[in-house]
């Protein structure tokens, strides 16, 4: 344990060239869905030092979440937002944290401060939920990332200008065209961690004012990374 709060001043010293602290200090991260991918995203953001974070998820921790989502046995039957929030505070005690044990709604953006840079991380299962979130936040978010996972196949979409982005909406196909069943019906902790790393990596690129990758798919089984032409 640090002997004093001043010992934490250099907690980010090894990442400052990659994660600009001045831009990071203005960020409000919103993680929607804190299960397989979302829990890992929240933990990575907290470790990175995001000063403000809001979590949305209505679910409680079940036994089958332990191996694939990294929760502790002591978390079973706890609300996921509370379990994840507690772990995030352990990573970054100064984190300003807001926990909502509910689904994201259009009205959820009310009260978001105009003095912060809102960065949205979508980690939900359903296409319709993604569509609602996108339509709700695209006018206020400055960065947007969506992580999707089926077994050992990961897809990460990102936008550094959601208000005018014409690429991401093309990924919001109809529910009838979607994968039949939950996208996390088969999952592993390592796949979720890699998906989260790709999302937070795009966030770091945005912080450095570098162009983000709009769409990338990683097939771990085949060791293939695909980046389609976004034009």
Image (cartoon, grey):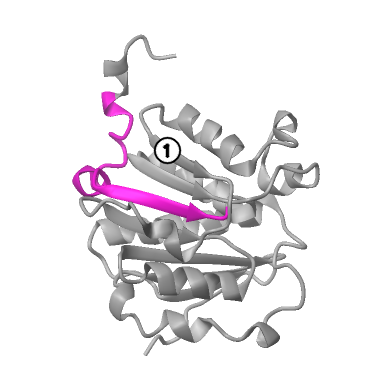
Question: Percent position (x, y) of residue 100?
Answer: 52, 46
> Furthest residue to the right?
63
Q: Is residue 18 visible?
A: no
Q: Is residue 141 visible?
A: yes
Q: Secondary structure at mark 1?
A: strand
Quarter of the image with the N terminus in it: top left
Which span of residues is magenta-colored?
Answer: 9-33
Question: Percent position (x, y) of residue 56?
Answer: 53, 51
Q: Is residue 170 magenta?
A: no
Nearer-the-camera pick, 231 or 132: 132
Q: Is residue 15 magenta?
A: yes
Q: Tell me the residue at 48%/68% (across/down).
A: 133
Nearer-the-camera pick, 37 or 31: 31
* Quarter-of-image position of residue 126: bottom right
User: In the picture shown, does residue 65 fall above or below 1?
Assistant: below
* Drawn side of residue 169 relative to residue 6, left or right: right
The residue beneath circle 1 is: 97
Q: Tell me the residue at 43%/61% (across/down).
A: 107
> Furthest residue to the bottom?
231
Q: Tell me the residue at 38%/50% (across/down).
A: 29
Q: Residues within 10 Å of mark 1 (few under 14, many from 20)?
A: some
């Amino acid at each position: 344990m640090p002997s004093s709060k001043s010992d934490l001043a250099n907690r980010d010293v090894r990442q400052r060239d990659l994660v600009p602290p001045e831009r990071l200090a203005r960020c409000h991260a919103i993680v929607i869905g804190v299960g397989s991918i979302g829990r890992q995203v929240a933990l990575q953001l907290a470790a990175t030092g995001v000063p403000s974070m809001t979590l949305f998820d209505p679910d409680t921790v079940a036994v089958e979440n332990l191996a694939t989502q990294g929760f502790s046995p002591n978390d079973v039957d706890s609300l996921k937002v509370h379990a994840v929030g507690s772990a995030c505070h352990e990573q970054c005690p100064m984190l300003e944290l807001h926990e909502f044990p509910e689904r994201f709604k259009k009205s959820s953006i009310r009260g978001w401060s105009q003095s912060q840079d809102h960065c949205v991380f979508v980690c939900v299962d359903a296409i319709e939920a993604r569509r609602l979130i996108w339509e709700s936040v695209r006018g206020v978010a400055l960065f947007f990332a969506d992580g999707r996972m089926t077994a050992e196949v990961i897809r990460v979409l990102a936008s550094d200008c959601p208000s005018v982005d014409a690429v991401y909406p093309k990924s919001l196909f109809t529910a009838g065209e979607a994968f039949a069943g939950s996208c996390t019906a088969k999952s592993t902790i390592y796949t979720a961690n890699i998906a989260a790393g790709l999302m937070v990596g795009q966030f770091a690129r945005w912080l450095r004012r570098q162009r983000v990758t709009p769409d990338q798919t990683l097939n771990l089984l085949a060791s293939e990374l695909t980046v389609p032409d976004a034009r």
